[in-house]
Amino acid sequence: MYQVYVISQSGKPLMPTIRFGKVRKLLKSGKAEVISRKPFVIKLLYETSEIVQPLTLGIDPGANTIGVSVRKEDGGIVFAAELETRTLEVTENMTERKAHRMARRRNSREKQKRRAKKNNTAFEKKEYQIKGCEKPITCKLIKPGRIKFLSRAREDKWFAPTCRHLFNTHINFIKKISKILPIAKVIVEYSKFDIHKIDNPDVKGKGYQNGRMKGSTNVTEYTLCRDQHTCQLCKKKTGEMQVHHVIWLRNGGSDTPENTVTLCESCHSNVHTKPKINQKLKEMFEGIKKRYVHATILNSIMPAFLEWLEREFNYVSITYGYETKDKRREFKFPKAHWIDAYLISWNGGGPPDIQNYQPYQFKQFRRHNRANIKRQEDRKYYIGKTKVAVNRRKRTAQEFDSLKDLVVSKDCSILNLLTVKSASRPKRSKCKIGMGDIVLFDKEIQVVKGFMGSYLGFIGKEKYNHSIKQSECLIKNCGIVCL
């Protein structure tokens, strides 16, 4: 059963209530105001006592889904929820940002080269000794720019971007709950994964030092020895042998022996240039994607997360996954993150009553998409209003003709007819509605999941057929949104 969460006039969380009639009267008389609609939170506008019961918060950390549950001392559920995080999306965004950054720097360098040629300051070849590099760097036309990595300093407790994002997500979600409920005690499942033991459940003692790659310098050497320096496609044993990732690293493949195979130089080239041969190889050797990514991320953030909890709350204790699993088996509960969070906080006694409780579902949305500082529009050439070419030379995967192609197919005289629209960074969208916003459409409250032209897509709706003009934005995206 859903409850109304109450905040005192001074901003302290009070005990929630199911006296909906009383809440309605307070709102109508102006003695309270609505802070949030889902979950429904009100703030009292008059002084009242701030006596509360001690509540216990159970936390089930996760990389994709975080489960939380708050209970009273008698076991009654006060709040339960699951949060779907953006962990995988962060990695994809980092890869996309890297591609835009490389293209931007390449364009800038090409511009410097053209300027140097025009001013007769370009040179054929020169060697420069760059700070931070062991050997001199041979440069053409222009001298190298400042080495970027030399100006980057890492903090003592540095996290990789994906780990830092997940760590901040856990903190922000717990802060969001503690603002509406008086949490007195926190119990968290301490996620500590033994990656070697996941691979080999029987490993112990010296087995940790005697892995399958013992004696090999790296994965490449291990794979070549395992395949006996034989091409796994044509079975050739002579010539240079190369190691290939069945599922490419850029597509999420792992740099592990299970995902590598030995190929000759010719077959390796065919795999990368001919999709049919690449598909044949995947069918023969089913590569695996990166394994244990989530386990590794949780291993990284858990000590810092536990340290933060101990600073924020007076009483913090930990439990482990096997204990939660035993409780779930004992009560025959289904596997769910919010149920695990409740069992983490369970203090014993009879079987808890959770059959009729519906947990809140939260989803994390991206708040800022700085496309105007990442992407760069192509240079376009027009004859009148008709676009006839894009860029001076073709970019990778560009299908439209470039200026060079146009001159080859027509004539140099066509250059006098062209008008040029220079490459530029795109402007921010003027639309006032973004992903994660809560909008009113056709008298129903919806959460925006994306765009398609001038139409919106809502969570729970497949089609993107809801007009932006007919939608009214009620609440802007706050990062963690209740669906």
Image (cartoon, grey):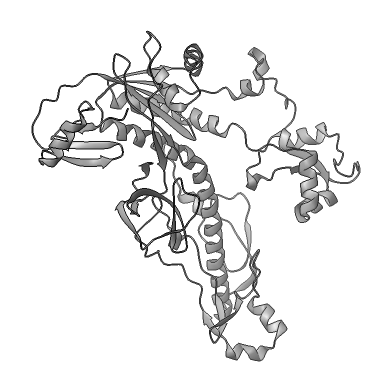
Number of numbered discs present?
0
* Whether residue 55 is situated above or below residue 123 in the rendered picture: above
Measuring 53% from the left and 82% from the top, which residue is drawn there?
420
Measuring 57% from the left and 34% from the top, which residue is drawn there?
293
Measuring 48% from the left and 16% from the top, which residue is drawn there?
328
Q: Please tell me which residue lies in front, 118 or 49.
A: 49
* Whether residue 325 is situated above or below residue 296 in the rendered picture: above
- Give the percent coordinates (x, y) of residue 270: 81, 53
Residue 263 appears in the figure: yes
Q: With 261 as the anchor, is 469 left or right in this view?
A: left
- Give the percent coordinates (x, y) of residue 81: 38, 31
Q: With 420 as the anchor, is 479 left or right in this view?
A: left
Measuring 63% from the left and 52% from the top, which residue is drawn there?
135
* Whether residue 309 is situated above or below residue 124 in the rendered picture: above
Quarter of the picture holding the N terminus: top left
Quarter of the picture holding the C terminus: top left
User: Furthest-left residue in view?
Assistant: 47
* Whether residue 425 is situated above or below residue 35 in the rendered picture: below
Q: With 321 as the anchor, is 396 left or right in this view?
A: right
Query: Within the image, what quadrant is residue 198 found in?
Result: top right
Q: Please tell me which residue lies in front, 9 or 188.
A: 9
- Give the percent coordinates (x, y) of residue 414: 63, 89
- Give the percent coordinates (x, y) of residue 386: 57, 82
Query: Within the image, what quadrant is residue 287 found in?
Result: top right
